[in-house]
Image (spheres, rainbow, N blue to C red):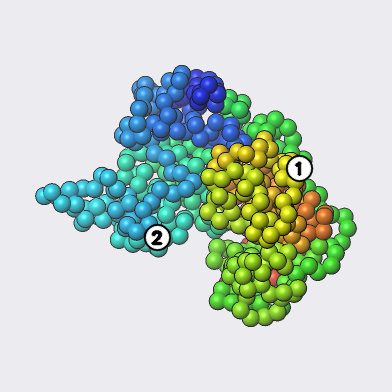
Amino acid sequence: MLRMTGIGKSFLGVRVLGGVDLEAAAGEVHAVVGENGAGKSTLMKILAGVHTPDEGTIEIDGRSVAFGHPIEAQRAGVAIIHQELTLLPERTVAENVFLGREPVRRGLVDRAAMESATGELLESLGEEAFGPRDLVRRLSVAQQQVVEIAKALSLNARIVVMDEPTAALADHEVELLYALVRRLTGRGIAVLYISHRLREIFDLADRITVLKDGARVATAEASSLDTAALVRLMVGRDLDFYYPPRAAEPPGEVMLSVRGGGNARLHGIDLDLRAGEIVGVAGLQGSGRTELAKALFGAEPFTGGEMTPCRPRSVREGIAAGIGLVTEDRKAEGLLLNQRVRDNALLVARAAGMRRPGIERLLERVRLNPPRPTQEVRLLSGGNQQKVVLAKWMTVAPRVLLFDEPTRGVDVGAKAAIHELMRELAGDGVAVLMISSELPELIGMSDRIVVLRDGRIAGELPAGSSEEAVMHLAAAS
């Protein structure tokens, strides 16, 4: 279906792709993996007509093509489903699916035809929870991805690129996405799948191509690789410290305690966080995980129950109590993207009226690569942006640090670095709470796991518990 040969691309004299080959067959899931900066996005943008290659050729169905615009790529059957969805929230599902291509009858948009065609597309994808007339803003992220896939099918796409499609999904929604991918390949569509979640790669991919520093390192059958071998290809070394060893010493004093904590979303929360301990928080989407972190921090305060050393009623009180929150959405809630690294790292310290610490040393400690305080944050990879968020909180030396999806959308190297930093913080006596939708991460990092269901703590599990045990508590009726 697709053959890209010898693709090369440079920006301002910097070579970002060099002689990359990539093939995808009809009905195949071909995963494209690599660290941030490996060239994955540039290669996909060339396929989608966003960039033109400096060298190399592209063939679709054996015919040479050259795209000067994304519309030309769409007409050739190429569709991209981006990590950050491109839907208009105030318009209906049908209006989004046929945006810019609305069927017309007698000079007016033929809404009946548009909604009928959209309904057929949704039915073909097995979607019954919403219809063509529903507003997109009322849909979950998983449902919005179904709309993006329906849009791709309406374009008669034969090659679908999926860029980090599960980044914002809970575990049970990931399974739904798997089913959609299999429906696409069952139709003979070639799927190029980009993800930092290695488990998904092995669950879905038929073949895997690894990029590193703008070059193709290897292409192999997924069945011929394991996680360790794939990581070695991606980063050029073993990541034995992917999940650093747990502390040998027992946890220290209680740094934060809640008894009977509750608000509109949470009920009867009893929780202790101790110095030197990483407590994992599991639960399905809507279980109250993020709400728990925000309540502890004071962003969405508890309205009932007791909390010591204090029950913060605002973010300012939370910071004053020595509590920090690494938010789920770093771009929207954690960073000022158009400002410099230094200014972002000092946000909390300045707000708290504290003296500026040595930022350069701190950036080196969080493994920012390269540690350039004057660089704009928007130019950094996702992993480096997350390290800046972490540095922001380390400037005020919190006693309790809450992490909400700390490694979402970061590559394996940055993920390992963040894990090591979390364990270092715990070793320094910080009480760490970590929310994660990735069960292997939750089990690999946590000293114990608290499971939420319907805004309540459904149970607690010890370190090393199985994924089945976690899901039993999270989903039990």
| Distance (Cα) linking label 1 and label 2 | 43 Å
Neighbor class of circle 2 (other Cα within 10 Å; few <14, some 14-19, many 20+) is: some
Is 135 placed above or below 197 here?
below
In the displayed orientation, state which residue is furthest to the right.
249
The residue drawn where x is 36% and y is 49% is 150
The residue drawn where x is 66% and y is 37% is 372
Q: Is residue 223 left or right of residue 86?
A: right
Q: Nearer the viewer, residue 446 or 228?
A: 446
Nearer the observer, disc 1 or disc 2?
1
Query: Residue 293's image quarter?
Result: bottom right
Q: How many marks?
A: 2
Is 412 placed above or below 91 here?
above
**Residue carrying label 2:** 137
Secondary structure beneath label 1 = helix
Number of the label disc, if any, that sits on residue 61: none
Q: Nearer the viewer, residue 264 or 346?
A: 346
**Residue carrying label 1:** 361
The residue drawn where x is 87% and y is 61% is 250
Which comes before the other along the chain, label 1 or label 2? 2
- Residue 350 in the image, given as x and y percentages of width and height: 66, 56
* Quadrant of the drawing holding the C terminus: bottom right
Q: Nearer the viewer, residue 344 or 280?
A: 344
In the displayed orientation, state which residue is furthest to the left.
106
Question: The residue under label 2 is which amino acid type?
Answer: Arg
Question: The residue under label 1 is which amino acid type?
Answer: Arg
